[in-house]
Amino acid sequence: MNAPVPASVLNPSQVIEEVSRAWNEDIVQQLTDYIRIPAKSPMFDPQWKEHGYIDTVVRNAATWVEAQKIEGLKLEVIQLEGRTPVLFFEVPASRGAADQAGSAQTVLMYGHLDKQPEFTGWRQDLGPWTPRYEDGKLYGRGGADDGYAVYASITAIAALKSQRVAHPRIVGLIETCEESGSYDLLPYVDALRARLGDVGLVICLDSGAGNYDQLWLTTSLRGMASGVLKVEILTEGVHSGDASGLVPSSFRILRQVLDRLEDSQTGRLLPASFHCEVPAERLRQAQATAAILGDELYRRFPWAHYDCGGATTFALPTTSDPLQALLARTWTPTLSVTGVDGMPDLQNAGNVLRPYTAFKLSLRLPPLVDAAQAVQELKALLEDNAPYQARVTFEGASQATGWNAPGMTPWFEQALNAASQTCYGAPCGYIGQGGTIPLMNMLSVGFPKAQMMVCGVLGPKSNAHGPNEFLHVPYARQLTAAVAQVIARMP
């Protein structure tokens, strides 16, 4: 007897019901267990192999995937010599899809399991490794960024299989080096290139959302250049009363060096090559998104505040104009100091002129600026002609070029809007993100014709990388259902 031919139309109500049940009965608990494991990315845990946390979260995810018994799914944990491991899974095209023209196209699903470090400032009853589920939010490090991705991806595939809907070939790549800049990922992409196939759709669940009311497609990502800027003026600390005024402060020299890069009054980066023009399409999308989100674009952040004459005074953003706020965090190069060395804590800070000051710099670059070239220019700009002939070095530089999404095909745009309307009751929104996903630029170069569904759960106040990070579970459920519906509409 012939096997039933897969259906051509997905029942969205059934998808939402099945996905919600999987999240409520299983996935939330899986992510609760995941949050407890301090699987910090290698940059933040050089002894990651000895500690075994990354191996543990990979093994746990692999065990869960295999337990779902997805028809035809093959799963491997792959680890190249000296590299962090990856999960790779493959689901062949359904029979109905395989019989159609163009069925050689593949869907590539992506996520990561490594985490940012603890950071400080967590609410007293919360912590990075102590999960708590409260009002639909699962608090803890890594659940939203983006340990949920592998669980959501497999659940979306299960929803397709449950209804026997025709679907293309699907592969998944879950890495464990993303928060360190994905330096281990390219060797895996090269090793697996033949098995990836002809990728026609990439689904990346490592991005953000403008609000929790609709599906959001990421249209661009900034690049990043980072490294440690160090200024040395002495070989050891000396009494500040004896030396200050004669020995220049390493901190003051560092300030002068940074003045070459950034206007401290406005925050504008001075090198023209670090800027680029915003494409007309992205500007139009930003105008539409600014109209949707309004002042939520800057109100979403936890601004410092204090009492002043009986009224509460809040710290201010660089701009309160919604469009400029959106462009500032997505298409404008920006410098952040994310770490410092050479300074004792306040309790142990004696009257000593310190021998050196070191800052860890994180430079966010516009999507169209080449990061490798920017790093070369940055190093020369900071190191050359040091004040007082101090020893100035910029070392440990890493970089990732940003990404600008390719044009959308009609089927993809229609699928996104249909999924957003079905799952959220609102049309799909389009938004650039200020963060970096190194894989996206790699994939755009390798698969220039692929459509890119880059989305995620990092909406207002979700605070990835900082204290009180949370996963908005209702939004994640809806996103999982939306992913299944987009895959089902892929021609």
Image (tube, helix red, strand yellow):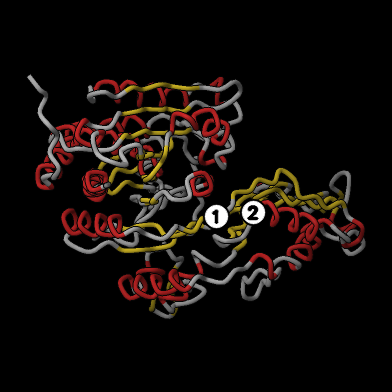
Q: What x and y, as percent, mark residue 51?
A: 53, 22
Q: Residue at x 18, y 39 (%)?
A: 19
Residue kind at label 2, given as amino acid type: Ala
Task: Please give the residue where the numbered disc 2 appears in the rendered image.
Answer: 371
Task: Residue at 30%, 61% (x, y): give it.
Answer: 211
The residue at the point 67 percent across, 71 percent down is 264
Which residue occupies the extreme left position in the image?
1
The answer to whether residue 134 is seen in the rendering is no
Question: In the visual, does 293 lie left or right of 78?
Answer: left
Residue 284: give x, y in percent of width and height.
Answer: 40, 74
Q: Quadrant of residue 161?
A: top left
Say if mark 2 contacts mark 1, CB within 8 Å.
Answer: yes
* Rendered view: 458 above or below 74: below
Q: Residues within 10 Å of mark 2 (few under 14, many from 20)?
A: many
Q: Where in the figure is residue 45, as x and y percent of width and height?
A: 57, 32
Q: How many marks?
A: 2
Q: Nearer the viewer, residue 118 or 198?
A: 198
Residue tagged 1: 402
Q: Is residue 313 above or below residue 424?
A: below
Q: Residue at x 35, y 28 (%)?
A: 90
Q: Residue 428 at what x, y percent from top left?
A: 27, 61
Image side of residue 281 versus residue 438, left or right: left
Quadrant that contains the N terminus: top left
Report, in whole angstroms, how far the alpha carbon at label 2 lies from the one at label 1: 8 Å
Relative to the observer, which residue lies in front, 456 or 43? 456
Image quadrant assignment for residue 385? bottom right
Q: Is residue 350 left or right of residue 21?
A: right
Q: Secondary structure at mark 1?
A: loop
Q: Amino acid at mark 1?
A: Gly
